[in-house]
Image: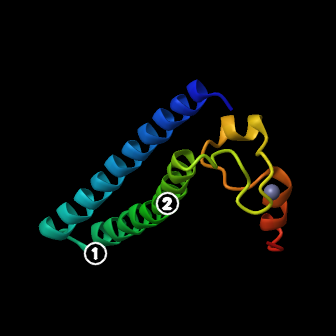
Amino acid sequence: MSITNLEAVKRELEAKRQEILEGMARARALGQVEGETGAPDIADRAAFALQREFSFSLTENEGKLLKLIDEALVRLANGKYGLCVHCGQPIEAARLAAVPWARHCLSCQELQDRGEL
Ligand SMILES: [Zn+2]
């Protein structure tokens, strides 16, 4: 992969990272506002609780994605970007284009999806 491509990937990863951090900050702020104002009746409280649960699970998924992005940035820095972390083979270009933080090549990803990795 050329240096120019790597720089573009780095910018893309950093932009996505920033986007997630901002989203998490918003979800946290939302949780705090709910906690402070409280909800006037039971039905509202239930709706708030549901929404809070949703934003927490969103944050959890985003936390995982953030970790994947950070790992991809480390691989970029040490020249291992684009190589499968399991078998060391280059990850398919189309897969990297779709998922720039991918850790596994397609065949290793299939193994992992089946719980065999
Ligand atoms: Zn692999």
Residue 59 lies, in percent from the top left, at 42, 61
Q: Indicate the position of residue 46 as horizontal and vertical percent values.
A: 35, 72
Who is closer to the viewer here, 101 or 57?
A: 101
State the residue lying farthest toward the front: 78
Instruction: Give percent across and percent down for residue 36.
Output: 13, 68
Q: Which residue is the site of mark 2?
A: 67
Q: Is residue 59 above or below residue 82?
A: below
Camera-nearest residue between 7 and 103? 7
The kind of residue tagged 2 is: Lys
Q: Amino acid at mark 1?
A: Ile
Q: Badges 1 and 2: C-beta atoms under 8 Å apart?
A: no
Q: What is the CA distance from the residue labelled 1 to the residue labelled 2?
A: 37 Å
Displayed-image quarter of ligand 1: bottom right
- The residue to which callout 1 is attached is 42
Quarter holding the N terminus is top right
**Viewer-side residue, 74 vs 29:** 74
**Residue at (50, 37) in percent of width and height:** 10
Residue 60: x, y in percent?
46, 66
Q: Secondary structure at mark 1?
A: helix
User: Which residue: 31% across, 66% down?
Assistant: 48
Taking the spot 82% from the left edge, 60% from the top edge, the residue there is 108
Q: At x 80% / y 73%, what residue is drawn?
A: 115
The mark found on residue 63 in the picture is: none
Quadrant in the picture for residue 39:
bottom left
